[in-house]
């Protein structure tokens, strides 16, 4: 049976300063103003929760009148799960409705209609402000790369009935505090979280979106089995892909917000009391110097804090969401990862090579990961992991300059701060012969110079939501990082 939910519809921060940003870093777009005039309305029409053989299917319907209808689907594999809470309870519907607003931004952005009409749910004034902030900050890179200069006050308006489901109207749900859901992406960060929390197949369940080889292999390397993974499969409506091919606006969206809402829904299904992420403190830094534009906005502490408040207000009593690695920077995480040799053959931190389970060796993420690990691993071991010495590739100089802070724009990827990267390369210089440095390390030595890594190896970030019972493992992480001084 398909259950559909539809109801007829009845202050933010200033725009970032672009004056200091080099025009050469921008990608010109179609006429934003013309598209908005031609397509003034985006509609969130309906959502549904359907049980299929071996799956729970979540469907949404969006439309831009005169342009396209969109019907994306996400399926959650259930044949290996014990479902303890109803997939379509009032609390579940609130989660799926919110997940739809995360999905909607991918479709809205093709024409950026100024009005969003919500026909299948409600938002109060607080909720409208919350979603407006997520869309604005989560699309910062999209606006920048398309040369769009939005004004927070009027880039979008949300219209819905001004009444909301009160939290106390939710049915009591089953939550098992000893069960924890751990999202894994197949990169070094989630590997460290798996190591810290241990291969406890009684208490821990893993979560993936769209199976990729590295994710399953990392789970197996950590001691888990295929049956311990909660798998979700998210599809993009072909109509959006067609519009992208025709030149409509396209670009980065806050995907980690999708991960947040979908992981909390899946945790609710199995009764898990916690969702433990692997987002670090470095995700807080903007991608473009002097602005709020952050490729990793939905991995930032600001989003984590906002999301937790949203869950408290709208899913009262649901799973607790936090990042276990928020106390640490990327250099500290790399220090821990360098000791986890079981993950060397299987982890992948490259988005470009994710589908083929390879390191592309040509992107900022590959170069960043290679540089971080160069602080802790000998050159021959790095080459074995990545398949090449990325420091010898002169074509990576622009990405290298961005990572080192020699350009105002970092690679638009999940990379850390220039300070962390420079500290890692300073440590790496000890491992390479001074009279035969590879090209990029020579550039670093000549243009940046040695930096003291101790502030980064000893750094303590107190802005986090790690539960008190897990704090001893953060202390152990700090001690391990300090041991490299």
Image: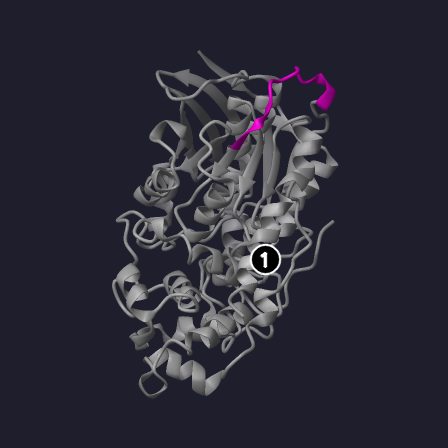
Residue 178: say if magenta.
yes
* Closer to us: 82 or 63: 82
Disc 1: CA contacts within 10 A as few (<14), some (14-19) or many (>=20): many
* Closer to us: 31 or 302: 302
Say which quadrant the N terminus sits in.
top left
**Which color scheme does this rendered protein use?**
one colour
Q: Residue at x 47, y 52 (%)?
A: 252
Q: In this picture, is 12 found above or below 102?
A: below
Give residue 62's position: percent from left, percent from top: 48, 33
Q: Residue at x 65, y 40 (%)?
A: 467
Indicate left or right for 14 with 283 as reference.
right
Give residue 268's position: percent from left, percent from top: 55, 25
Where on the picture, by quarter, is residue 318?
A: top right
* Residue 144 in view here: yes
Q: Which residue extends farthest top?
A: 1
Give residue 419's position: percent from left, percent from top: 55, 71
* Residue 110 in view here: no
Say which quadrant the C terminus sits in.
bottom right
All told, the count of numbered labels is 1
Q: Which residue is mark 1?
A: 478
- The span shown in magenta is 167-180
Kindly state the secondary structure of the residue where label 1 is placed. Answer: helix
Give residue 260's position: percent from left, percent from top: 54, 39
* Closer to us: 76 or 348: 348
Residue 123: say if magenta.
no
Indicate left or right for 315 with 414 as reference.
right
């Amino acid at each position: 049976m398909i259950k559909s939910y539809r109801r007829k519809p009845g202050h933010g921060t200033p725009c970032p300063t672009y004056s200091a940003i080099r025009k050469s870093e921008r990608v010109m777009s179609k006429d934003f103003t013309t598209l908005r005039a031609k397509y003034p309305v985006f509609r969130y029409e309906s959502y549904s929760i359907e049980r299929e053989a071996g799956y729970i299917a979540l469907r949404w319907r969006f439309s831009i009148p005169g342009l396209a209808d969109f019907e994306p689907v996400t399926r959650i594999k259930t044949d290996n799960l014990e479902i303890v809470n109803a997939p379509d309870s009032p609390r579940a519907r609130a989660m799926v409705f919110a997940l739809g607003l995360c999905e909607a931004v991918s479709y809205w952005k093709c024409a950026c209609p100024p009005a969003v009409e919500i026909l299948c749910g409600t938002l109060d004034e607080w909720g409208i402000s919350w979603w407006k902030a997520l869309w604005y900050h989560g699309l910062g890179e999209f606006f920048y790369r398309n040369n769009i200069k939005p004004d927070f006050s009027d880039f979008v308006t949300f219209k819905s009935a001004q009444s909301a489901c009160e939290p106390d109207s939710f049915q009591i749900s089953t939550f098992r505090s000893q069960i924890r859901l751990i999202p894994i992406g197949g990169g070094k960060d989630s590997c460290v979280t798996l190591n810290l929390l241990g291969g406890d197949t009684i208490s821990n369940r893993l979560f993936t979106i769209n199976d990729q080889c590295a994710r399953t292999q990392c789970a197996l390397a950590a001691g888990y089995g295929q049956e311990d993974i909660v798998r979700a499969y998210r599809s993009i409506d072909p109509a959006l892909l067609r519009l992208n091919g025709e030149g409509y606006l396209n670009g980065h969206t806050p995907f980690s917000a999708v991960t947040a809402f979908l992981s909390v829904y899946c945790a609710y299904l199995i009764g898990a009391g916690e969702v433990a992420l692997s987002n670090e403190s470095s995700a807080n830094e903007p991608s473009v110097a002097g602005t709020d534009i952050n490729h990793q906005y939905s991995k930032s502490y600001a989003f984590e804090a906002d999301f937790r408040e949203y869950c408290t207000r709208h899913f009262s009593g649901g799973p607790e969401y936090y990042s276990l690695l928020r106390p640490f920077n990327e250099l500290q995480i790399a220090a821990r990862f360098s000791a986890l040799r079981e993950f060397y053959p299987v982890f992948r931190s490259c988005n470009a090579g994710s589908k083929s389970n390879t390191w592309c060796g040509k992107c900022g993420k590959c170069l960043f990961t290679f540089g971080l690990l160069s602080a802790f691993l000998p050159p021959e071991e790095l080459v074995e992991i990545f398949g090449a010495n990325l420091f010898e590739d002169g074509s990576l100089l622009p990405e290298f300059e961005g990572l080192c802070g020699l350009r105002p724009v970092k690679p638009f990827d999940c990379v850390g701060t220039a300070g962390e990267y420079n500290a890692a390369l300073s440590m790496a210089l000890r491992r390479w012969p001074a009279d035969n440095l590879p090209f990029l390390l020579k550039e670093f030595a000549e243009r940046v110079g040695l930096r003291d890594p101790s502030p980064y190896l000893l750094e303590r970030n107190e802005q986090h939501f790690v539960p008190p019972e897990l704090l001893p493992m953060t202390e152990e992480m700090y001690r391990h990082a300090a041991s490299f001084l």
